[in-house]
Image (tube, grey):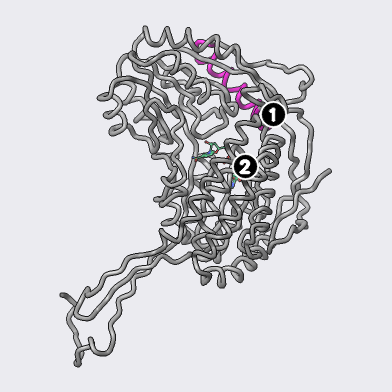
Amino acid sequence: MQVIDNLVGGKKQRSASTRNAPVFNPATGEQTAELPLSTAVELDAAVAVAKAAQVAWGDTPPLKRARVMFRFKDLLEQNADRIARAISAEHGKTHDDALGEVQRGLEVVEFACGIPHLLKGEYSKNVGPAIDSYSDRQPLGVVAGITPFNFPCMVPLWMYPVAIACGNAFILKPSEKDPGAAMLVAELLHEAGLPAGLLNVVHGDKEIVDAILAHPDIKAVSFVGSTPIASYVYATGTANGKRVQALGGAKNHMVIMPDADMDKAADALMGAGYGSAGERCMAVSVAVPIGEKTADSLIEALAPRVRALKIGPATDREAEMGPLVTKQHLDKVSGYIDKGVAEGAKLVVDGRGFKLQGYEGGYFIGGTLFDHVDKEMTIYREEIFGPVLSVLRAGSYDEAVRLINAHEFGNGTAIFTRDGDAARSFADKIEAGMVGINVPIPVPVAYHSFGGWKRSIFGDHAIYGPEGVRFYTRIKTITSRWPDGIKSGAVFNFPTM
Ligand code: NAD
């Protein structure tokens, strides 16, 4: 059985922990690796290494730091196929989807190549007589990231290229469900020339997360995962005096206006609802057609598409959707479908009981479609994180907006329409952090920033892009004058101009 090591001080290190977690191939249900769950003592050692390495790195010219990112980008491109296979082996997503994940992570590395430009600061001459002032963005020191299972390569890349290019050292705690891809990518950054100690990977579960949140030398924590844990990480980390950005769960709605092109809207919903088996924080899990006629034609367009979904392991290059990540998650998603039926939603396509010949031990489930869902139902209120699309019929555009704005989550949302006025008003008034107009999954590109609203985020900064640079740096403002500018005599009044 393969044992997955930590990566500390640029070297693989076997954890001495006596607690382990199994890692599975979700397509077959076979255990493929054993993951030791590191201890707080092991985290301490990694933080000490990071703290020592950060001193020289923080003083390294930003351009030299960025050059490491240029080489990293090359290596990610050369190894994209290998990384995608590592992602699929533990997560289950299709190969093309995994390649897309690598590409979107790589784009943050491209952004990090240009970070010297964003660290320039501001300068003002003569803020007073012979007095000049400038501000500068300085690294925080050692920062940490805690990441979810659903993007094991991309989400870590949302964080550490930005943090490290800004001059920080980083501790990464990947998801224990699929830790392999994160390790592979971290090794490539060292191959690109990153000095030892600046990126350390320490695997584990709640014990390590709690140790990160309590560690006095960790100055900031980025978290991406489910809302209950995001809220806990934010409350605990900030109570311990850290900067925290904690991105949580989602329930993303897509409004389909009566004037929308129904075929295009249905195709968009298929990709956004069932791609990656619905295990995306930007997946569309609720379709909101406006008016009964729109709803009827939407169901008519969707039902055959959902029945025709090609489901298979990542090795099947024709597959459109893979298995769920674990047996527990499969049971949870099936349980939600049971609940939807029990609470009175109309089950149009039932994915329960789906079996794939030759992969009977895999965690597969078929695409599921519910109609006549209402806002009190559990399948509407809670994040399912599976290939289950709920159709909630709204009588009017205003009703759809009220519905979305009242939901506890506000990650992403979309509207499909040809009506520019409706689209413009939707973009302006809707309470969500990322809005798509005829774009079902509006994930911002790397030089913008990613973040939801409401209980989809805890903290003041969205992740990556310019917001990432602000999060991983602190501003210092220097006011200076030279002896010729200093007037003699003490001044006791508060200085004014
Ligand atoms: P999760 O919350 O279970 O785990 C995320 C991280 O927290 C993991 O590293 C895990 O080890 C750690 N963790 C789990 N339980 C913990 C506990 N009790 N105490 C401390 N740490 C704990 O999330 P997941 O199942 O890996 O990922 C899916 C979730 O992530 C979904 O809710 C999804 O919407 C969300 N997500 C959000 C975004 C976003 O940008 N908003 C992006 C991707 C995923």
**Front-lying residue, 230 or 72:** 72
Specify the quadrant of the image occupied by residue 55. bottom right
| Segment colored magenta | 324-347
* 421, above or below 58, in the image: above
Is residue 328 part of the magenta span, yes or no?
Answer: yes
Mark 2 or mark 1, which is nearer the start of the sequence? 2
SS for callout 2: loop
Question: Which residue is found at the position 74% from the left and 47% from the top?
Answer: 35
In the rendered view, does 175 fall on the left or right side of 405? right
- Rate crowding at label 2 as few (under 14), some (14 to 19) or many (20 or more) other CA atoms within 10 Å: many
SS for callout 1: loop
Q: Position of residue 382 (x, y in %)?
A: 49, 28
In the rendered view, does 26 fall on the left or right side of 371? right
Residue pointed to by mark 1? 314
Residue pointed to by mark 2? 152
Question: Which residue is found at the position 34% from the left and 70% from the top?
Answer: 477
Question: Which residue is found at the position 42% from the left and 28% from the top?
Answer: 439
Residue 86 visible in this rendered orientation of the protein: yes
Question: Which residue is found at the position 62% from the left and 16% from the top?
Answer: 351
State ligand 1's quadrant.
Answer: top right
**Quadrant for the N terminus in the image:** top right
Residue kind at label 1, given as amino acid type: Ala
- Rate crowding at label 1 as few (under 14), some (14 to 19) or many (20 or more) other CA atoms within 10 Å: many
Specify the quadrant of the image occupied by residue 190. bottom right
The mark found on residue 174 in the picture is: none
* 322, above or below 106, in the image: above
Specify the quadrant of the image occupied by residue 436. top left
Q: Position of residue 10 (x, y in %)?
A: 69, 61
Distance in Å between CA atoms under marks 1 and 2: 16 Å
Residue kind at label 2, given as amino acid type: Pro
- Most common SS among magenta residues: helix
